[in-house]
Image (spheres, rainbow, N blue to C red):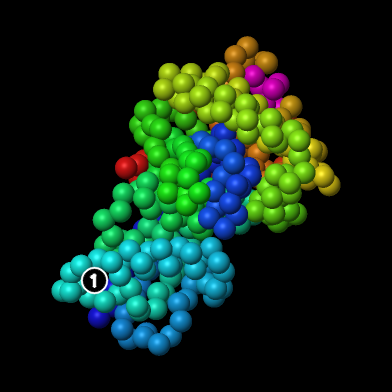
Amino acid sequence: KVYRATTTAPVNIAVVKYWGKRDAKLNLPTNSSLSVTLAQSDLRTLTTATCSAVYAGQGDSLLLNGEASDVSGARTQACFRALRERRAALEAADSSLPKLASLPLRIVTENNFPTAAGLASSAAGFAALVRAIADLYELPDTPSQLSLIARQGSGSACRSVFGGYVAWRMGEKADGSDSLAEQVAPASAWPEMRAVVLVVSAAKKGVSSTSGMQQTVATSGLFQERIRTVVPDNMAKMEAAIAAQDFAAFAEVTMRDSNSFHATCADTYPPIFYMNDVSRAAVRAVESINAKAGRTVAAYTFDAGPNAVVYYLEKDADVVLGTFSSILGAGVDGWKGSAAPSTAQAA
Ligand code: DP6
């Protein structure tokens, strides 16, 4: 018999950024963060987990977009181990259950977006991996409990276990048991939200987030101020903006937090630059769109790469997208389609 489960997980883009680990092994962050989940019709990872006694004796395997991928990495292993432990506990308590925990796992995973979009595919990737295996093992865990496991794969992955507006609470315990994601609001609470990914460069990023944030924690003085006052303040303001569906407030916190994160990168020694000239032109374009509209209609944010994600409301789609392409048209490689917040994984 072959046991199989298939699931999808969405991409999330942080509006209050995770940047910094207090424990690199468990992926425990130095600050809380908050993200908006993007529509799965545009951006998602699809993963199937299979196990069978037929493959007994073989190792675990992972096929990523059709190519064999390494499963021996510490992060993948941490996820496999945590999920197997939970399954083994179920099997120990109920001897009628099939013994799946000891069988090799076969994982097949696919993204429906090009890696050129430069999106943190590890977030959707690990969230889908954890969910597919949890479904395969019929684990009773809640999404927040599964987020604890996904976090060990990639920090931002814990937020992709949910849809809508999602907070990752940093927690304070050394074992990480309180460093988990929770839904702040379902997508339906503010369904007009849209995001467009502006592909500034398809090139792979220079400094990985994992290594970049370690360098920032170790060398930036500004970073200390960010985690002590800036982020807690932004988290509170962001949650209030989402609760009130206040786009101007949402946009200001989003842009300020992105700027603050990239300022700590510049304050890292030696400095890290993720944004380039085209990224900065996108910032100016958003400012000019807002100035022309006489109100805030668009907000930019940048992760560990040059591509911009611009948030706007559906009613302002024409003014935002139209002006953007006329200002930046020549300077950009292309767009990745507009994305509404995802409801599919909302728990
Ligand atoms: C800038 O989650 O990719 O996108 O935990 O080391 O896998 P690891 O890092 P990762 O970092 C994401 C950083 C960010 C901000 C964010 O998504 O909050």
Residue 21 seen by the camera: yes
Q: Indicate the secondary structure of the residue bearing disc 1.
A: helix
User: What residue sits 47% from the left and 52% below the top?
Assistant: 175
Above or below, 151 relative to 62? above
Residue drawn at point x = 37 percent, y = 85 percent: 55
Q: Position of residue 93 (x, y in %)?
A: 20, 67
Q: Residue drawn 30% across and 75% down? A: 100
Q: Residue furthest left?
A: 96
The magenta segment: 285-290
Dividing the picture into quarters, in which one does residue 329 lie? top right
Question: Is 296 rendered above or below residue 71?
Answer: above
Above or below, 240 against 151 in this view is above
Residue 90: where, in percent of width, then height? 25, 66
Q: Does mark 1's beta carbon lie closer than 8 Å to ligand 1?
A: no
Query: The residue under label 1 is which amino acid type?
Result: Ala
Rendered-image quadrant of the N terminus:
bottom left
User: Which residue lies most toward the front here?
Assistant: 174
Q: Which residue is situated farthest in the right direction here?
A: 270
Quadrant housing the C terminus: top left
Locate residue 73, reporting x and y percent: 57, 69
Which is nearer the eye, 71 or 195?
Answer: 71
Is residue 186 or residue 235 the one in the foreground?
Answer: 235
Tell me if residue 6 can be seen: no
Give yes or no for residue 286 being in the magenta stretch: yes
Based on the displayed image, in which of its 4 quarters is residue 79 positioned? Answer: bottom left
Give the residue at mark 1. Answer: 92
Q: Most prominent secondary structure in the magenta stretch?
A: helix
Q: Position of residue 317 (x, y in %)?
A: 53, 28
